[in-house]
Image (cartoon, grey):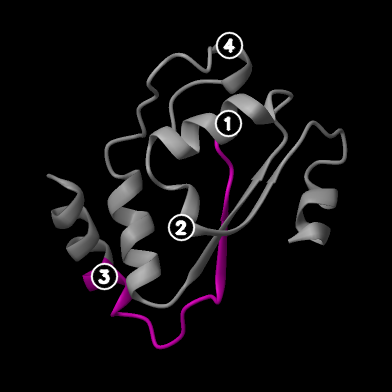
């Protein structure tokens, strides 16, 4: 199923709910893509999980903002990958930095 099919299916599922969240926050590594950024090079072309882009599009179409909270020690690689994948502009906030606070700092910034 392509991005459009996934998007349509996700919109159909979301239509079952009377209230949707205003914001959904995603991690990156092993959430949107199947690898750790620190194990990759900026020269590579990353791949998202097959349904990730369609779900992101569905959330945006339903008026739900999306953000990123990632504890990656290589934010430059993550940022490059988001740009290469053409999804960087979809996120209202991108908090990508190494942290031991279990993402508390990330959420406070968002």
Tell me residue 94's x, y (percent): 64, 50
Q: Indicate the position of residue 77 as horizontal and vertical percent values.
A: 59, 24
Residue plotted at (19% across, 62% down)? 9
**Separation of residues labelled 2 and 1 (CA atoms):** 14 Å
Q: Which residue is labeled 2 in the image? A: 90
Label 1: few (<14), some (14–19) or many (≥20) C-alpha neighbours in 10 Å: many
User: Where 58 falls versus 70 (above or below)?
Assistant: below
Could you tell me if the residues under marks 1 and 3 are in contact, i.e. CB atoms within 8 Å? no
Along the line of sight, the residue nearer the viewer: 89 or 31:
89
> Which numbered mark, 1 or 4, is in the foreground of this view?
1
Horizontally, residue 77 falls left or right of residue 30, namely: right
Residue 78 is labelled as: 1
Asked which secondary structure carries label 2, the reply is helix
The local crowd at label 3, few if under 14, some if 14 to 19, many if 20 or more residues have their Cα within 10 Å, is some
- Distance from label 1 to label 3 (Cα)? 27 Å
The tag earlier along the polypeptide, 1 or 4, is 4
Of badges 1 and 3, the one in the foreground is 1
Between the residue at mark 3 and the residue at mark 2, the CA separation in whole angstroms equals 17 Å
Query: Which type of secondary structure does the marked residue at label 4 adopt?
Result: helix
Specify the label residue 11 is tagged with. 3
- Residue 58 seen: yes
Give the residue at mark 4: 39
């Amino acid at each position: 199923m392509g991005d459009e099919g996934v998007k349509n299916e996700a919109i159909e599922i979301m239509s079952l709910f009377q209230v949707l969240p205003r914001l959904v926050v995603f991690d990156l590594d092993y959430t949107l893509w199947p690898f750790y950024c620190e194990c990759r090079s900026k020269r590579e072309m990353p791949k998202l999980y097959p349904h990730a882009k369609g779900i992101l599009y569905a959330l945006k179409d339903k008026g739900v903002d999306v953000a990123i909270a990632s504890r990656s020690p290589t934010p430059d690689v993550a940022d490059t990958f988001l740009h290469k994948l053409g999804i960087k502009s979809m996120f209202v906030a991108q908090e990508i930095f190494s942290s031991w606070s279990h993402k508390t700092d990330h959420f406070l910034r968002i």
